[in-house]
Image: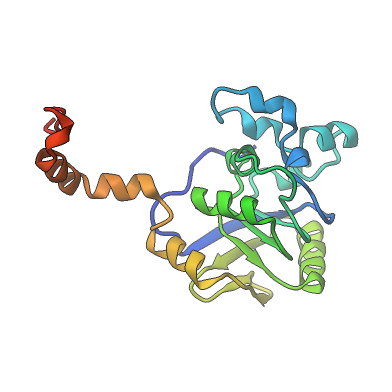
Amino acid sequence: MSATSFPSGSIQQIEGRALAVQGEDIDTDRIIPARFLKCVSFDALGDQVFADDRLELKGAHPFDQPDFQGASILVVNGNFGCGSSREHAPQALMRWGIRAVVGVSFAEIFYGNCLALGIPCVTVSPEDVRQLQQRVIAEPQRRWTLDLQALSFSSEQSSQPVTLAEGPRQMLTTGRWDATSQLIAREAELKALSNRLPYLNGFHLTA
């Protein structure tokens, strides 16, 4: 499992090694099984990502293979993240160490939940994904860069154009996806507004 350094602020590039999870229509119940939804925080979910698949494959799952430990970019196929709308799925991926996902297509709610966490989900064609997955599997130590300005996924040996809608791209590259950081950056304005609101009955942000 990767170190937990979470995304924040403006995201221009994601660099790191990749791993591939192959298969169409991988749903959120496979990404994080329902029994782990009882947690009171998301902190431990990284250890349980793909828990049932990993148990079935007895160490052969990409998330268990030593060569892929520390990878930060996930390469998947079509309709990834379908099924229930649980936020736990991208939370589990993020807490394992995933910082970006490259795939053919994504379920809409999963895509939105990833965006809210600062995890770009970019798309390429089915054939391009298959080729990328084979490269990732064959060369697990290869380093990749997902560039949100150039809209490319590249290594020293190759470069692949990717697609990301302009709205999400702008949110990620300007930092507008990160509501917490935006609030902290505008603390003085929030305090001034609070002090002008009569209905707060003295509960002003003056500390």
Look at the image and tell me whether residue 90 can be seen: yes
Q: Residue at x 42, y 49 (%)?
A: 8
Q: How is the image coloured?
A: rainbow
- 42, above or below 159, in the image: above
Is residue 9 left or right of 57 when viewed as pictured? left
Answer above or below: position of 159 versus 5: below
Residue closest to the far front: 199
Q: Between residue 161 and residue 42, name the one nearer to us.
A: 42
Q: Residue 103 at x, y = what percent?
A: 71, 62
Counting the numbered discs, the total is: 0
Quick one: quadrant of the N terminus?
A: top right
Q: With respect to residue 167, does 195 lie above or below?
A: above
Q: Nearer the viewer, residue 22 or 195?
A: 195
Position of residue 183 measured from the top left corner of the image (x, y, whole percent): 29, 46
Position of 14 compared to 101: left or right? Answer: left
**Where in the figure is residue 18, as x and y percent of width and height?**
68, 56
Determine the residue positioned at 77% across, 46% down.
27
Q: x, y percentage for residue 151? A: 56, 74
* Left or right: 30 as drawn, with respect to 158: right
Q: Quadrant of the C terminus?
A: top left
Asked if residue 64 can be seen in this view, the reply is: no
Q: Name the residue rendered at 65%, 41% in the picture.
A: 89
Front-most of residues 2 and 181:
181
Residue at x-position 38% and y-position 48%: 179
